[in-house]
Amino acid sequence: MTGAKQTPGTRPPTNTILGLIASIAFVIAALTFIDLNLEKAERRDLASQARRAHLEGASLIKQGKAEQGIDFLRKAHALERANTLYELDLIDALIAAAKTEDAEPLMNEILLREPGDGRANLTAARLMLERGKAVDAVSYFHRAIYGDWPENATAHRVAARMELVRLLVKNGRDKELLAELLPLQEEARKEIDHNPKNTDAYAALGEAQLEQGQYRDAHAAFLAALRYRPEDPSIRRQLDLSSALTDLDPTPRLLTSLEKYRRSLHILQLAYDNLNGCIANRPEVSRLLSRKPPSNPTNELSEGVLATAEKIWQACGAGVSPKVDPLRLIMQKLAETEPRP
Amino acid sequence: MLKASLRAKLLNWTGFRNREDQLSVVLSIVIGVIVGLTVVAFILLTGRLATRMYPPGGAAWRRLLVPVAGTLVSGFLLFRFFPDARGSGIPQTKFALFIQDGYISLRTVLGKFLACSISLASGIALGREGPSVQIGAGIASVLGRRFGLSKANVKALLPVGSAAALAAAFNTPIAAVLFSLEEILGNLHAPVLASVVLSSATSWMVLHLILGDQPLFHVPAYRLVNPLEFGIYAILGVIGGLASVCFVKLLLKLRIWFKQFPASTVWLQPAAGGLLMGVFGLFMPEVLGVGYDYVDRVLTGDFPIKTVVLLAIMKLIATPLCYSSGNAGGIFGPSLFIGAMIGGTIGTIAHTLLPGLTAAPGAYALVGMGTAFAGIVRTPLTSVIMIFEMTRDYSIIVPLMISNLISFFISQQFQREPIYEALALQEGVYLPTGESREELAGIPVGDIMQTGVELLSTSVDIAGAKQRFENEKVHSWPVGDHNYLQGVVSSHEIETAQPPPTTIADLIKAGGEYPFVHSDHPVSYALERMGAAAVDVVPVVSRANIHQMYGVVTLSGILATYGVPDTSPGLK
């Protein structure tokens, strides 16, 4: 591209042609070198700007400044579009700010790009939940559980399945819940073997055991979790719950008849207190509760009390919003044990 | 001998008539590579310079001073060293193509690169695409000349370089081909099509190898929600068209105004654009630069309407001033920006009023981009394809076409001259437009051909033939018997044939080629055929049978059509 002027239409001598070809090769090589270096510098700059924006956004969201935080996360995403982490954090923030309409196109974009990504599917499940599409959410939870997790796969799968379990509990989908509990326990145990300090795995194991009526084991799991995260209020709450249930459970074999009767009455009392409005006109319940405990109660007597409590639960409890409380869990366990008279 | 014959066969098979044809094809690829690399460097360098001038978290005073300083520096460089690198680059490329035999100097290429990098990085409201076109065409011109191509072939390389540049600058290889043909050449059927496609594709590949596969804009998948939206898109076309007219008229008026100042102030004038940008940028930083980031945000519907309206108005004022004051930079990017903002505004209003019946505002911003481009640059076909390629979203193509055409027609109605031709006119240059070329070439041969003429019989002797030429006042005439055309003979052929012929039959070869045209061919084509065959009469024949003659078209007949009296002496 440099050199002597050439008159148009006249064929340059061979030497000049060779010189030109060499010059062109040199120019191409030089330009490629410049471009690659500029591009590398540009990419580095953009990545650093995106990282800064992401940190700023995450920090603002933690401070409760959702709108400003989302702005920064959007910037981070615009600067580094291929970064799935930034995009997922932005979607999470949008979901939290109830901007699900804005989140959905971004979500579709990621799922199109990485349909098997575990975290993307988990976020999609949360988005579906937020949009009231529980069936779709369950399907995304499953994709998240069986999807790709580049790091700590078991821990992430346990956490994802745990969220699914909570959804199923909330929606009262007992059959599907039972199908999830066993694998949740297995995965949590596997994760604990692999990483004995994983608090979430202990908590998930505890939850699964709690749902399966293994209150004493659940209590032990929550206790272990609390050892690594003593300030966590949710673990503390679950520990208390498992403790209460252990004290309330009338099914252990080694219980004395008196203890079993006492616990049965306690359960009946709870059912009565919780569902008071529904059973106002049931004199036999008041009679049972006001009766002085017999000095030598039999197991049959306890079973009778429990049967009454279950009847009340079945009559009134099904319509009540199923919360994670001792009564629901104990009733669930009682329902799974042998049929009562 | 065998080697020469093989070579001839190969050339015939490939369609390469000579060495220059082969060299042009090879050069198309080389141009694609070099232009692609240069434009990528231009994009990256401008971006890096801009980052240095506006560091993250930089003080507000930078937004006032940097555009002024940037335009002063680039203005001085343009005035002192690179006067031909001023402006957008598209009209300059057309000047080179139609007036300067395809000549663009290396100095202009370097000047455009340098001055534009500085001025665009400083935040003025102009784009990088027009300059890229001139840089690309310039590289093609330099290479063509260095390889000793003829002027015609150097000229033919300019659209090749332009397409390569646009493909890399906009990441739109198909639109780049269309633009080169539609706007630069003004002819969608130009014979350089293959070279243009080759260079565009090569340049695009270079871009992808270095910068990866990312579209210029990221658009969610929009679709037409309700047929009622066609009406809203039509309104967008009208408003976009009117805004385009305002933009072009303001730009042209300001250009005339700046031209009134003494020549010694030319170096200072660009600072006027810089100052306005500084003032605007101080209050609204989003207006600085070409603003593709904000277009992206509007396309995803993530911008408050107040900001969108303000940005549209500010850019509508800032871009004409920046351009007219003599800065180096293009109007492609700003026209897309303005269109996106207008579309975003209309979309937001429509979506607020009819939420269930309309798509998100981003869909309107997307269509708005094409609308403003079609109205300002006046290349409706390119604009549709360009938006499609930029966004890779096919679902919105029908509304885009409707809106674009409305905008194009409104713009044509209120602003007769397209912007680049009008700018050229201000410089005293009459560039041929696509429309004018069509008008010139539009007279079909059938309109002026002489019918009922008799063929010169093959049995006529030479003296009889000469007598016929004299009677008809021509130098050549079609030959045949019983209304079966067999060829065309000229007086020159009769004079120079060896051995000297006795009858016309001696000059006619069986199955030989002869010049002819069809009645729907333009007269310009008939002239070309006359020139190529060195005759002044060509027969007009049937498309189904070239031996069936309908009439003849003569050189004097064509001249008479254009009002030129026949002064040829004939054989007299």
Image (cartoon, helix red, strand yellow):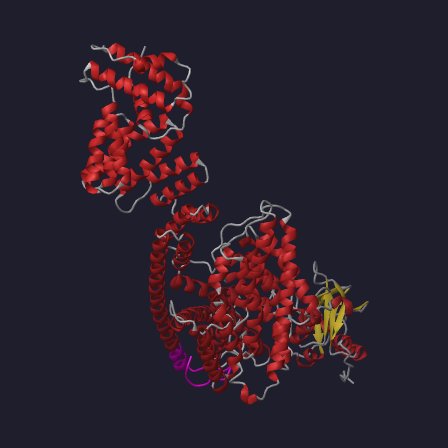
Q: Position of residue A156 (x, y in %)?
A: 29, 42
Residue A339 seen anywhere in this rendered image of the structure: no
Q: Is residue B340 left or right of residue B445?
A: left
Q: In which quarter of the image is residue A123?
A: top left
| Image height of B477 relative to A70, above or below | below
* Quarter of the image where the C terminus of chain B is located: bottom right
Residue A246 appears in the figure? yes
Look at the image and say whether residue A186 sits in the magenta stretch.
no
Residue B248's image quarter?
A: bottom right
In the image, residue A314 above or below residue A50: above
Does the magenta run of residues contain A15?
Answer: yes
Residue A324 position, x and y percent, is 33, 30
B105 horizontally vs B492: left or right: left
Q: Residue B98 versus residue B314: which sits nearer the camera?
A: B314
Identify the main secondary structure in magenta. Answer: loop
Q: Is residue B378 above or below residue A178?
A: below
Residue B172 image position (x, y, % from top left): 50, 62
Q: What stretch is highlighted in magenta?
A: A1-20
Q: Residue A22 sits in which quadrant?
A: bottom left
